[in-house]
Image (tube, rainbow, N blue to C red):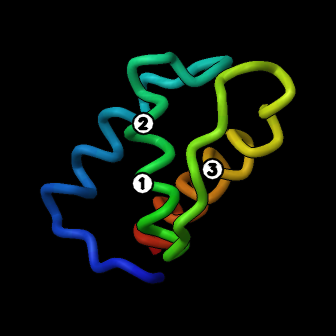
Amino acid sequence: MAYDFSEQEITEIREKFGQIQDRIPNHLAGFVWNTYKKIKGSNEKQPCSCGSAAKHWRKAYDSIKSFLNSYDN
């Protein structure tokens, strides 16, 4: 992990991540991408929210989900 999250940040990630259903809402896109970058220590630019960038968003989503699961254990 590249960034040491505070308890408050973890709570915020859980709350916002819980709002995601079938797709990442536009108002959460920046939050999801920035959280992903912190977890991975990445400096990747945020992809567009079009269908062709779905693999990048899936990668971000899966990384956050995995992070939260490992944080619980």
Q: Alpha-carbon distance for marks 3 and 1?
A: 8 Å
- Judging by the rendered image, the residue that carries numbered circle 2 is 30
Please say if the residues under marks 3 and 2 sit with CB atoms less than 8 Å apart: no
**Residue pictured at 42% horizontal, 23% vertical:** 19
Please say if the residues under marks 3 and 1 sit with CB atoms less than 8 Å apart: yes
Upstream in the sequence, badge 3 or badge 1?
1
**Residue pictured at 42% horizontal, 51% vertical:** 34
Name the spot of residue 62 as percent of width and height, x first: 67, 51
Q: Amino acid at mark 2?
A: Gly
Residue 47 to residue 2: above or below: above
- Judging by the rendered image, the residue that carries numbered circle 3 is 60
Q: Amino acid at mark 3?
A: Ala
Q: Amino acid at mark 1?
A: Thr
Dot 3 crowding, Cα within 10 Å, few <14, some 14–19, many 20+ = many
Residue 32 to residue 59: above or below: above
Q: Pick whichever, 46 or 63, lies toward us.
A: 46
The reply, left or right, for residue 7 in relation to residue 16 is: left
Upstream in the sequence, badge 2 or badge 1?
2
Upstream in the sequence, badge 3 or badge 2?
2
Q: Pick whichever, 61 or 68, lies toward us.
A: 61
The reply, left or right, for residue 25 in relation to residue 19 is: right
Name the spot of residue 44 as percent of width and height, x first: 60, 60
Dot 1 crowding, Cα within 10 Å, few <14, some 14–19, many 20+ = many
Q: Secondary structure at mark 2?
A: helix
Residue 8 to residue 2: above or below: above
Quadrant of the rendered structure where residue 71 is?
A: bottom left
Q: Alpha-carbon distance for marks 2 and 1?
A: 8 Å
Q: Pick whichever, 9 or 40, lies toward us.
A: 40
Q: Nearer the viewer, mark 3 or mark 2?
A: 2
**Residue pictured at 65% horizontal, 23% vertical:** 49
Which label is found at residue 35? 1
